């Protein structure tokens, strides 16, 4: 995933207090992430897992990712190629898990102004979200090391890249 999107990401709107059980339902937890992702958000948006396209974004109300510490909640969104989740606030555990698996989270106080189906562009490094028509919404700054982690595909991918043996030509 990249820290910026320039092709007009499609928005999927969700409400407040989206919990990890909705993102990674308990009945699917005995399976691998490929199967868990097929059930992502089934209780809130039955059309989501089958309709989300690579590069789409989720825009939600406050408290996104509350509930358990299951890493699969964020990993399911990565598996579905969601480019980012934008919300006024995130659960602390979900936030850490998201960056660890390479999912970009943008904290934006004005997120609820963004509509279902709207096309937006964002630049996490600059801390901005651009709506159709040019309105710019501010996103909280994200430390560079977390953006680097997202761009690498998550913490494990970043460590693998960092510590893989270098070959000389």
Image (cartoon, helix red, strand yellow):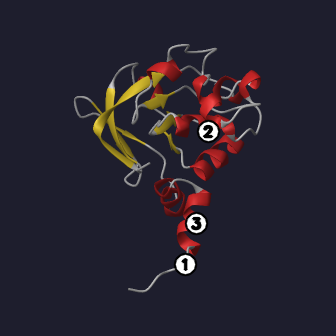
Marks 2 and 1 sit apart, C-alpha to C-alpha, by 30 Å
In front here: 128 or 167? 167
Closer to the chain start, of discs 3 and 2, is 2
Choose mark 1 or mark 3, whichever is in front: 1
The percent position of residue 152, horizontal first and vertical second, equals 49, 58
Residue placed at 47% from the left, 39% from the top?
84
Residue placed at 47% from the left, 82% from the top?
167
- Residue named by callout 2: 74
- Residue named by callout 1: 165
Mark linked to residue 160? 3
Q: Quick check: can you spot residue 7? A: yes
Q: Quick check: can you spot residue 91? A: no
The reply to whether discs 3 and 2 touch (Cβ–Cβ < 8 Å) is no
Closer to the chain start, of discs 1 and 3, is 3
Marks 1 and 3 sit apart, C-alpha to C-alpha, by 9 Å
Q: Which element carries disc 2, helix, strand or loop?
A: helix
């Amino acid at each position: 995933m990249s820290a910026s999107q320039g092709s007009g990401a499609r928005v999927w709107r969700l409400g407040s207090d989206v919990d990890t059980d909705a993102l990674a339902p308990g009945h699917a937890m005995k399976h691998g992430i490929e199967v868990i992702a097929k059930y992502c958000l089934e209780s809130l948006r039955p059309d989501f897992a089958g309709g989300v396209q690579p590069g789409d974004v989720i825009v939600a109300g406050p408290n996104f990712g509350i509930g358990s510490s299951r890493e699969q909640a964020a990993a399911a969104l990565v598996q579905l190629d969601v480019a980012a989740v934008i919300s006024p606030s995130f659960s602390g555990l979900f936030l850490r898990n998201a960056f660890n698996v390479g999912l970009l989270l943008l904290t934006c106080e004005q997120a609820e102004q963004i509509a279902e189906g709207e096309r937006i562009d964002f630049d996490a490094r600059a801390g901005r979200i651009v709506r159709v028509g040019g309105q710019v919404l501010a996103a909280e700054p994200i430390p560079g090391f977390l953006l680097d982690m997202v761009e690498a595909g998550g913490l494990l991918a970043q460590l693998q890249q960092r510590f893989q043996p270098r070959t000389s030509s």
